[in-house]
Image (cartoon, helix red, strand yellow):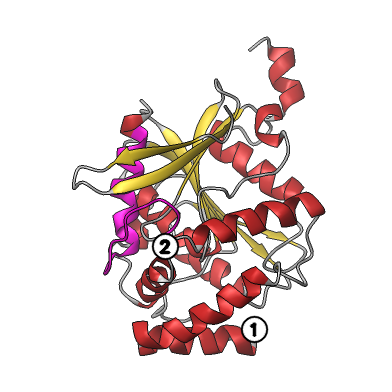
Amino acid sequence: MDGQTSTVTTPDGRRLGVCVWGDPDGAPLFWLHGTPGSRFLREPDDSYVRHHLRVYTYDRPGYGLSTRLPGRRAAGTAADVRAIADAFGLDEFGVAGVSGGGPSALAAAALLPERVRRCAVVAGLAPFSSEGLDFFAGMDEEGQQGWQLNLQGASALESDWQEVLAWVKAGLPDLNLSDAEHAMLIETMIEATRQGSGGYIDDSLSFVDDWGFALEEVRVPTRIMVARDDTSVPAAHGEWLVGHLPAAELITVDGGHFGPRHDPEMELLTWVGHGDASYSPRSRRNSGL
């Protein structure tokens, strides 16, 4: 069943909640959720089937069904992705992350070079101590205040978590999304709150910590997508990443942090899965594959 939840046990005994979406015979890729988020992040239509993609999503530690892991860094994602890939028999795959999932996607690409074929980041942040980047330039006041809480530590983030809960309970108002996308995001966020604040706090602290790998280690082909009007993670973050990754290119789209960007995002995920920039469902059918 598409989207059915399963769990994977890591070598150190933790549990990871996993969903699989799309074409059972499609090109495999991991799609890593933002902060907060959960395994229910996906395109709420048949796009994955039409583009012949098999998309794996999972709860980062502390979200949804996944065992919390206090003190985790972005680099730890690589071991979790490996555990899931092993459980599903995946030798090679693509990896992509959105927003707070960006560092995790880059970590998997850096630390699993023998298995990750391509990498993409959508509206993802740069390392907090990025030399030559004005980290807060173009960021709205709410975002800047959130980063100050990240620096203050776990106790300060508890109050921020209460605001997140209130936003979720209010139905995530004022987002420029289709009804289907909005419903999907509400489902994703409700599941993200299942265990409480732990996953959100651990994500937030990891962003201001060392990520645990060097960007120079990300040697697979990488595409960074930024939105011109994003005031949560300004486009300058993605532009900085492209300048510091060995094999990266920039894609700029209209809109803000939450879109809308269905078509360019699907084009990007199709590239991550298939690798052919000219790929389309029509060209695949015509090829007889």
**Cα distance, mark 1 to mark 2?**
33 Å
Task: Characterize the local packing of mark 2: few (<14), some (14-19) or many (20 or more) Cα atoms within 10 angstroms.
Answer: some
Task: State yes or no: residue 144 in magenta.
Answer: no
Q: Quadrant of the N terminus?
A: top right
Element type at marker 2?
loop
Q: Quadrant of the C terminus?
A: top right
Q: x, y percentage for residue 26?
A: 56, 25
> In terms of image quadrants, where is residue 107?
bottom left
Disc assigned to residue 45? none
Taking the spot 44% from the left edge, 65% from the top edge, the residue there is 244
Q: Is residue 170 above or below residue 249?
A: below
Q: Which residue is mark 1?
A: 138
Taking the spot 73% from the left edge, 57% from the top edge, the residue there is 182
Q: Which residue is mark 2?
A: 195
Residue toward you, 106 or 204: 204
Boundaries of the magenta span: 63-85
